[in-house]
Image: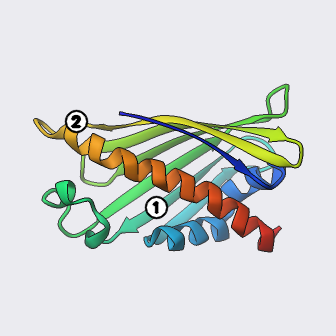
């Protein structure tokens, strides 16, 4: 299933990139998503290419109904964001992969961050996949709108968080 979103964040590109490698921002997003941030780590220097990994806990009541029979006690999501060095035009690419612990469902997305004056345009393209026999496509289709909403919430959260933390 496909996800495609474009959001403009009213903050400079370097601040947006730095937020991807900031645990306080990851915690802020988790609170906005009403999930827990169980761990956060960064490998590499956030001035160049780096990888940020967040592990979040999703309580059972936040899991879509169709998936509850597979994850009745909640869900652990591991999100890995690989942030590239700047391209020739200054843009950065964030390759995001989200895996659900104990369930064969995942999401992959490419986020292209481009400076537009003092703002940053975020183009997101990705997909949700599930290899659960017989119902995998239905679960992926059910999860897709949640993933799209989550990505939009992250972009809005970036702007809000950066207003008070940059």
Identify the residue at the far right of this view.
Answer: 117
Which residue occupies 39% across, 53% down? 146
131 and 112: which one is in front?
Answer: 112
88 and 61: which one is in front?
Answer: 61
Looking at the image, residue 96 lies above or below residue 161: above
- Indicate which disc residue 160 carries: none
Which residue occupies 20% across, 55% down? 67
Task: Rate crowding at label 1 as few (under 14), some (14 to 19) or many (20 or more) other CA atoms within 10 Å.
Answer: many
Residue 39 % position (x, y):
50, 67
Residue 41 % position (x, y):
59, 60
Q: What element carries label 2?
A: helix
Task: Rate crowding at label 2 as few (under 14), some (14 to 19) or many (20 or more) other CA atoms within 10 Å.
Answer: some
Provide the residue designation for mark 1: 55
Which residue occupies 31% across, 72% down? 59
Residue 31 % position (x, y):
52, 74
Query: What colour scheme governs how the chains and residues are painted in the rendered image of this protein?
Result: rainbow
Looking at the image, residue 45 lies above or below residue 126: below
Residue depth check, mark 2 versus mark 1: number of the one nearer the observer: 2
Q: Is mark 1 on a helix, strand or loop?
A: strand
Residue 141 % position (x, y):
29, 41
Provide the residue designation for mark 2: 137
Which residue occupies 71% across, 68% down? 161
Where is the C terminus found, in terms of image quarters? bottom right
The answer to whether residue 21 is visible is no
Cα separation between marks 2 and 1:
25 Å
Pointer 2 and pointer 1: residues touching (CB < 8 Å)? no
């Amino acid at each position: 299933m496909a996800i495609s979103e474009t959001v403009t964040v009213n903050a400079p590109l370097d601040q947006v990139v730095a937020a991807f490698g900031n645990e306080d921002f990851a915690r802020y997003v988790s609170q906005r998503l009403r999930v827990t941030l169980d761990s956060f780590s960064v490998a590499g220097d956030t001035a160049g290419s780096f990888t940020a990994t967040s592990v979040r806990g999703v309580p059972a009541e936040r899991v879509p109904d169709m998936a509850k029979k597979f994850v009745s006690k909640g869900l652990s999501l591991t999100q890995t964001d690989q942030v590239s060095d700047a391209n020739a035009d200054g843009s950065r690419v964030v390759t995001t992969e989200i895996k659900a612990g104990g369930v064969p469902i995942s999401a992959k997305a490419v986020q292209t961050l481009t400076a537009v004056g003092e703002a940053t345009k975020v183009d997101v393209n990705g997909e949700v996949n599930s290899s659960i026999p017989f119902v995998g496509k239905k679960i992926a289709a059910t999860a897709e709108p949640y993933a799209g909403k989550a990505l939009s919430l992250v972009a809005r959260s970036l702007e809000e968080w950066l207003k008070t933390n940059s």
